[in-house]
Amino acid sequence: MTPDGSLLSAEGLHKTYGATPALDGADFSIHPGEVVAVMGPSGSGKSTLLHCLAGIIQPDSGTVRYGPHTLTGLTDVQRSALRRSDFGFVFQFGQLVPELTCLENVALPLRLNGVKRKDAERQARTWLERLEVETVGGQRPGEVSGGQGQRVAVARALATAPRVVFADEPTGALDSLNGERVMSLLTDAARDTNAAVVLVTHEARVAAYSDREIVVRDGRVKDMLAGLI
Amino acid sequence: MSLLRSPAGRAGRRSGDRGHTPPARRDPPAPLPATARTGPVGWAHDLLLGMRFAAGGGREGWIRTALTAVGVALGVAVLLLGTSVPTLMDSWHGREKARENLGQLHPPAPADDTILYASTNTVFHGEQIRGRLIRPDGAHPPVPPGIDRLPGPGRMMVSPALKELLDAPGSALLRARLDYEVAGVIRAEGLRGPAELTYYAGSATLNSPRAYRIDHFGKEYEPRPMQAPTVLLVVMTCVALLMPVMVFLGTSVRYGNERRERRLAALRLVGADVPTTRRIASGEALFGSLLGLAGGAGLFLGGRQFASVVTLWDVNVFPADIAPSPLAAALIAVLVPAVSVVVTLFAQRGITVEPLGVVRHRPPVRRRLWWRVLLPLVGALLLVPMSAEQAWTDTPLNTLRLTAGSVLLLFGVTALLPWLVDAVVGRLRGGPVPWQLATRRLQLNSGSATRAVSGITVALAGAIAIQMLLTGMKTGYADAYAQSARERPDAGIMGSVDSWQQAERALTALRATPGVTDVRGTVDASFGELGHARPDDRFGSLAIGSCAELRKLAALPSCRDGDVFRTGFDAKGKNFTPGMAIDLNPQFMADLPASPRPWKIPPDIPTARLLSPGFGPGNHSYDLLATPSAIDLARFDHPFMDLEVNYDHADPDTVERIRNSAARVDPTMYEHSEVDNPHDAQISGVRDGLFFGSVVVLLLIGAGLVISTVEQLHERRRLLSALDAIGTRRATLGWSVLWQTAIPVALGLGLALGCGLALGSLLLAMIDSAVMVDWAVVVGMTGVGGVVILFVTALSLPPLWRMMRPEGLRTE
Amino acid sequence: MSIGHTLLGLLESGPRHGYDLKRAFDEHFGHDRPLHYGQVYSTMSRLLKHGLVEVDGVEAGAGPERKRYAITDAGVTDVAQWLARPEKPEPYLQSTLYTKVVLALLTGRNAAELLDTQRTEHLRLMRGLTERKRGGDLADQLICDHALFHLEADLRWLELTAARLDRLAEAVRT
């Protein structure tokens, strides 16, 4: 399947929005337990790469492999199912359902996977504890601070014990202290569960939590590790 | 910016002009500008600014403005129609009054300017046709409005609708009945409405007593006061149609509220003060409602063109009859835009637009129950005593009580709904994910959905109540007709006669009509006791017929032409004994000069027992029975033949052929049977209209719900994209949208059913009808509610799925 | 900052007199510290010795200032290697980094490459600091944070400079 035993890999991804190419032959690979930072100037195609890797959008050409699956060959329904079961997501903001309590938000992906409400909420509670926000479980996202909300989002991303966590500027809306805390909780938890983390960021201090970084420039990926070797 | 700088700038320049300070590179800080522009100019400026925002809001802004306009337009059109009803009825009655003369108390003597005038109304395929026979006495007869000259003998003037009916292919039997040459068409001023079927025919043979003499057209016509069910119906229809339109008006000016609040916040940031933002918001609402006002006037003017083809409750008028009084029109033109501004300001109470966003002064208030229950309770209290009273009496007070009671009851429903939704949704816990998403969203903010749904609730509750009322009335009429059909022969025909031979001819003609199974008939006449001081107290009735016809009424011992029988029928205590002298021309009014025509009851008169004695349909109360040779029929005053015809109902044309046979014998013969139940058509017309109205209102409210749902979806596009990213199925979110609409709508429907059934029962009790639930209507209305849910969901799904695309995740 | 590499880079666009070199250097990099003639000549003689430049010609009335220098192939290679080599991340690197970026643009090279290489070098150090911080006590954390913020500031400034100069590249090249 994947050539070098990697968990998730992509080859020759092309994606165009209108006349603007967002990805122009991008390659990528990540191993289990690895944290890879995706860097590059804004508009370079970082988010598009993340969306293609996660199967949220289909590239115009190129392949994405995940374990034994060729993601680019799956239907939308299959990819959605895979995202529910194997992937977790943290975004910059706007991802928590404002009407649900924080606890219910964390339990949401589990429930989407068919876990019973009681069990889902029990598991969700342990994740909230782990991310040090167990006190806000009964509150709605609008009633908690940005840092707490982002920890809830991380808890939600990790609740299904995903094999890959996709984080798109997860600290973008946070101050330094909260950003650092969220990053260290995220990477610690990912390491403990041997999950891979694809981390899109433009901040070097956040990227420093990664094992290696890649740079997306003009729709192409430069693997700095490979470049150095 | 410039808006705010200019006062300071002006102030600065002024101080510079005075020349006391050397020119500086920048003006020194000027004194604070006046807090806000005030006065009418400032007001107008702010309102205009708001209107510019409403007009320049891009495609979405336009859609909202258009929706507000549609809501207002609908309300305006309904209001204009409602205020047109009095003028409409006036002109309708006015034309009827001008063209009719039901007989003069002191009949004029034949003269150059008198005519003999007779009614020849008939029915064709259930359609009432007004017919008048005319025979001028001289050269200068009066002419009714709408025609220039009276038609000559054998010719007729017809209404356009009747002309069309006569020319129609299926009207051969009618052409045979109205066997006159069409001489012209009656103009509009001689018609009640464009669809009226009427004609004036000239006759050379018309004579008294079939006709009466008049010397002018036009009568003192007092419109019959409307009957209780009709009053109820009119009041209820106005309430049920206007209330949802008002609710819709109230909701439609709130569309795009959140976006508006953001825009106002931006204005606050550049320095607009709170009253200014309020005025700007009012200006935005004003723009939509002014558009709506124009649209409503257009809708009204365009819609009334269809008046010609609409017949509601037998009322059919010309488009020009539908015109509101100038005062009412002016009030509408002023009040509707004013209401939209007031609603906008009302919607903003409790919030302050601050530069960085909207501040809500109070946490969402717990909805209190007591005043919400009070409204419908007071309404019910007003109505219940009225339904317990014996029968409806049409007094202004009662009408007021009825209107107030119904309005309060219906309005109470809209007040109860938010509380009910809150109370029910607040208790919902858990459930599948879509259900949880929907209930949680409603728990957090149920206001906008509930507002829209309350419109549905009023419309449905009102519609159900009215439908119940109609069904009750319809069933009542149908029962009455069914009963009379059981008790009476199929068709009854009456007509004046001069001799028994005429009656004999009519009997023969009817018997020869295909489809007729049995005909029975006698000539009926009245007599009084000769010389009695109070003749109107003591009079009897007499039937003249052949032995064969008399045998159908009574058990005759034996019968030959020339025989007379007494029946001994004595229900009223009057006793006409053998040998008594009677008057064949009795005066029923004591003060009129009498001209008695005496006749003596034979002393040896045999007795014949009536087969079914008594009063009422199918029974007979004759005192005497006579064969044609026994008394000269011409000696009686106004003898008339009473014919009863049984026929085969399988062929619908049989009854038309019977009418033709009768008309051929004498066109003024009067059919008094009630073969066609006119109320079915009346009620069906109103029901169809009401149903159509309800569906339009519901669709409009559905459109409003779609807008607010899509608006809500639009505001959370990022969240929707994020939910899609974590692998949420489209179906999950689709179902949550469905539940989000379905829960308030279902609660609204339940409330509407309860309230509608209660109100309907009260109304039925008021007209002393049996309370029955028309389940077909209930199911139909519930179905319409369900359709609205599906309609809203179906229209919300494409935008939902569009917003679930990953584009929403892009931060750029 | 390496004056030698800078002068070499300036010669890449064409042979120059020593005086021209000083002027070019001052114009681009010498805002706070203009170069002395002596520095130019001593550097040039050192570069001549290593074969990185050659004397292109001498004009009449020859003094040292009349010599015209040109870059050799070895010199071009040397500039390229220097530009591609990330600087050891340390505080107050900006003058060196700035020189590198400008020279890269002046010589038609891709400033982004340089930036990426430097970022990787910075990140390598930052990862180490981050790791130390995660395992360390409060004092460690504070010290590491100080270094991390400085390193990040360098990178940010570098990125911003590269982005700005990219847009000015046309102007600079002409």
Image (tube, rainbow, N blue to C red):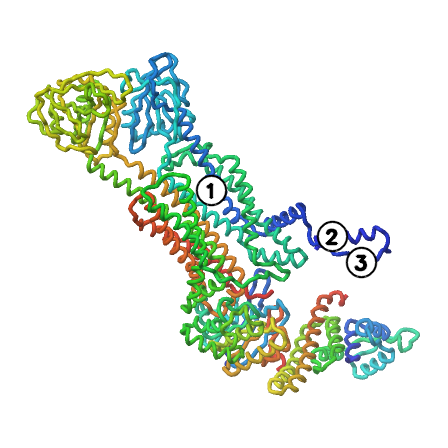
C-alpha span from label 2 to label 1: 46 Å
Label 3 secondary element: loop
SS assignment at label 2 = helix
Residue B6 disc label: 2
How many dots with numbers? 3
Residue placed most toward the observer, B572 or A42:
B572
**Residue to which mark 3 is pinned:** B28
Where, by quadrant of the figure, is residue B473 drawn? top left
Q: Is residue A100 above or below residue B320?
A: below
Q: Amino acid at mark 1?
A: Val
Front-lying residue, A97 or B446: B446
Which mark, by number, is residue B78? 1
Disc 1 packing (10 Å; few <14; some 14–19; many ≥20): many
- Residue B681 or A226: which is nearer the viewer? B681
The local crowd at label 2, few if under 14, some if 14 to 19, many if 20 or more residues have their Cα within 10 Å, is few
Q: Is residue A205 left or right of residue B200?
A: right
